Amino acid sequence: MCHSLNPVVMHRPSGRREDHPLRLLWKRLVQLVVVLLATTFLSYLMLSLLPGDTADVVCGLGCTQEQKDAVRREYGLDKPIPVRYGIWLGNAVRGDLGKSASNQVSVAESLRQRMPVTLELVLYAEIIAFAIGIPSGLIAAQRSGGVFDRLSTTFAFAALSAPPFVLAPILVLLFAVTIKIFPATGYEALDPLTKLQEGGIGAMFGNLFANLRSLFLPALILALAEAAVYLRLLRTDLISTLQEDYIQMAKAKGLSPRRVLLRHAFRPSTFSLVTVAGLNVGRLIGGTLIVEVLFALNGLGSFVVQSILKRDYIPVLGGLVVIVTGFVLVNFAVDMLYAVLDPRIRHARAIA
Amino acid sequence: MSTTSLLASTRPPLAVRRRRVVGAAVLGVLAIVAVPACGGSSNNNNNSGASGNIPEKPGPESPITIAAEGKPKRGGTVTYAVEADPGGFSATKSRWAITGMNIGLALFDPLVAVDTEGKPHPYLAEKMEPSPDFRVWTFTLRKGVKFHNGAPLTSEAVVRTYQGHQASFLTGSLITNLDKVEAVDDLTVKFTMKQPWATFPSVLVGQIGTIPAVAQQDMENGGPTNPIGTGPFKLVEGGYQADKVVSLERNPDYWRKDADGQQLPYLDKIEYKPITENESRISGLLSGQFQLIHTSDGPGIVKLREKAANGEVQKVEDLGESEEGFILLNMTKAPFDDLRVRKALAMGIDREQYVSGPGQGVNPTADGPFAENSPWRADFDYPKFDLAGATALVDEYKKEKGPITFTLRGGGPGIKPQLELLQTMLAGIGMDVQVETVEQTTFIVNALNGKFDANIWRQWGEVDPDQDYVWWYGGNAKPVGESSLNIGRNNDPKVDEALDRGRSTTDTAERKKAYADVQKQFAATLPYIWLDHSTWMIAGSPQVRGIGNGTLPDGTKSITIGGTTFPGAHRVTELWLAS
């Protein structure tokens, strides 16, 4: 990447219509729909190949063959897979995601209850990851080769190597059992309005605090591996940016190293960081399963996996819709974020 | 207990499991068909102590509890971490595994409950009288009992319940002998059997004995999320959140009082939280989040025993009849149709080594369907561990019929360590064994249909041996391809005759003789290769008192843990918090 001093002149705007924001939005929407269709159909296909039968699960063991056949008919399991999928799709586009075969709870209701947990967990994890990773990356890059740099690299590799199911019992033993500052399991739901009504501002903040406290350990476990990645990415990009000519120019002008780092070098070095963060958030929306199990959190991850194990396919599809949509939307947001981070893209689009 | 479950939400379904999950799942799944009971018969010892059932020689399984000082205090909330979501509160339509049973006992009352000897006493019923030929049982209900919705307890609710069971493919198989149930008057119910059934009351201690209100039974699917019982606790409005919590509050009109006349229950609220991971439950107990937990996980039990010895927690273990782990053989298939092979299996497995492996020595070894301290246990000669003898039998068989190869299966990934241990042991005597774990539901369905060679199985912790009838009776052995409750297809007229004798009389001595004959026959013909007895532990924080079933309405002591459908389940009627 060769930057000149005059960013606007350097890259002549291509004037391509494809870069217009609305056009981009449209492309993304089409992409979303295609990905949703493909993932849900393929998943349904693969699930139906698993051993075990929904009818067996629902009907139980005392069932006679007629009773089982009746259950199969009731749940439409006697129809071929593409037809079953088509029926689900027809209902889904009208907003009806169906209900669980095992406990009759509507899928939309379950998702509504479980999404906030996972979303909050993912956001919390990202915030902690940024809070650890970005300052560390900045310092490590500023004094690259120094003590902090080497220590933080070691920490990064340690955090990346320790899987969540190893970290979790250790952290729980330390912070929940021995020093009782965090709860070992469970989750205090965020309910600010009710608490405000019941007990005023104090209760509302109490609820917020309890919520953050209950999610801290699981979020930390997710965040550690990511913080390591962000630290390394930022550090590497920064080191390379800091060698650019315009940075030398800024230093020559007499700007303080801190100003140079934060005002001039940081933003251009965040592209990889933002891309990976976007991918992470998208991945985590469905990937918090292990942490959810270890801390008994009722989130999206455990919902999908429990449904798979119960051969309860309709909830799985509903969960997938949420996860895939989340993933695509987050990456779309990341694309839009590039425009914010890089003025050239913004100007290119504006001119186009 | 890792139980979780695949069958609807009664068992812990997650892939991160331990061995116990299999037991739980199998247990829960089979509960559908026969509501296995547990805990009934207990020890010969007479020290009652605050929690009852202390074994003669204090051992690692002895309860460690804090004695109550003064009278029970009223009030407070207890959080009980359980292994799975209960999966529905309908007595006739839901499948209760241990969690469902625990919560079921808080919301409902069973007609019958057992004392420390496993003998049935009327509980919700006031009287129960058989006709001289045991063909008709007349139950009189207690007066003045109300359901949570204010409706009075009448015979209509009981009649509807049993008609519901008869129509239910889940629970009906345990009462196939029931011909009809009728209301004689508002408080009297007449049960008429097809065949004489002396031990009928023992069936009414678990799920199939609880009485829901007619209003609940009239709801769709039996009202699985709307329990209306007569029990000490009722569901808080909106108190059931699937996989999250079951919130119960005191029933202010509960019909039981304690010995001092104080109305039960003592607690204001009890919350059951499904936490599938054993480690998480234990951490939660140690960190003060939970006041009660249960577990059947070997390493977890070892850890909690240490903590209890240090005074950090209290614990009570189920010392009664809990289930057995065993190898279930398909008797219709070679090589298991040959007694020599079965003998070789029994002699070739070192049970001591088996229990000290993955389970860390927590479970006692088994050589029959009854626990060491069960009053039903007889004397018989089960083959001892004898490698040379086993190998000799295998060699003899091989000379005649060729190599011995089969697949040993278990349900769920958690059982893999046990499978591999057995595989190694059996290779040592010359058998070529493949091992395989199978997804739970398929595992059980295949077993019932006879599509298996040998399975690691866990079952048969019944209060009364008559409840094992349905599993052991030759008449229930259906051909491969049909669903058979006698899963191993062991069709033995001697066993059948003894089982029929056992249920035809209430004379305990006669019954013990009958079941002694069953045990001797099992030891001789070896349809089941016994491994171990399971262990359940309830652990509590130092503040709780009165862990366990407590007393019966007539003041008799009840068996501490169990005595219902599931090992490890218990009432919470007399639970209280000391501070």
Image (cartoon, coloured by chain):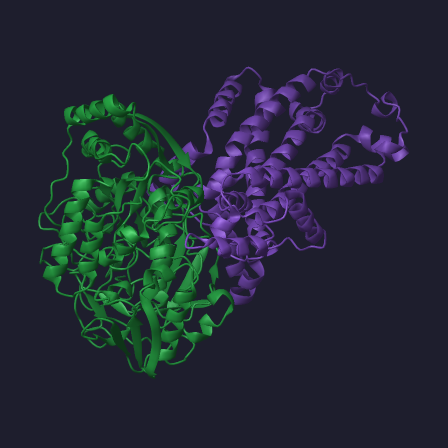
Q: Residue at the spot x=38%, y=62% of the render?
A: B172
Q: Position of residue A196 (x, y in %)?
A: 56, 63
Location of residue A26 with respect to A186 vertically, above or below: above
Q: Please tell me in which quadrant of the rendered image residue B76 appears.
A: bottom left
Q: Which chain identifier belongs to the purple chain?
A: A
Q: Residue furthest bottom?
A: B185
Q: Which of B411/B304 is in front?
A: B411
Q: Is residue B130 left or right of residue A31?
A: left
Residue at left offset 63%, top offset 43%: A81
Residue A188 in view (yes/no): no
Residue A85 visible in the current orientation: yes
Residue nearest the observer in this picture, A30 or B268: A30
Q: Which chain has been coloured green in this picture?
A: B
Quarter of the rendering containing residue B557: bottom left
The picture places residue B519, in percent across and down from the top left corner, at 16, 48
Q: Locate residue B558: give its quadrant.
A: bottom left
Most foreground residue, B312 or B330: B330
The answer to whether A63 appears left or right of A237 in the picture is left
Residue at 32% of width from left, 75% of height from top? B254
Q: Quadrant of the C terminus of chain A?
A: top right
**In the rendered image, the vertical position of residue A77 relative to residue A236, given as above or below:** below
Q: Quadrant of the N terminus of chain A?
A: top right
Measured along the vertical axis of the image, is residue B40 above or below residue A281?
below
* Of the pair B99 and B465, the residue shown nearer to us: B465
Residue B60 point in image, percent of width and height: 17, 44
Coordinates of residue A154 in the picture (x, y in percent): 48, 21
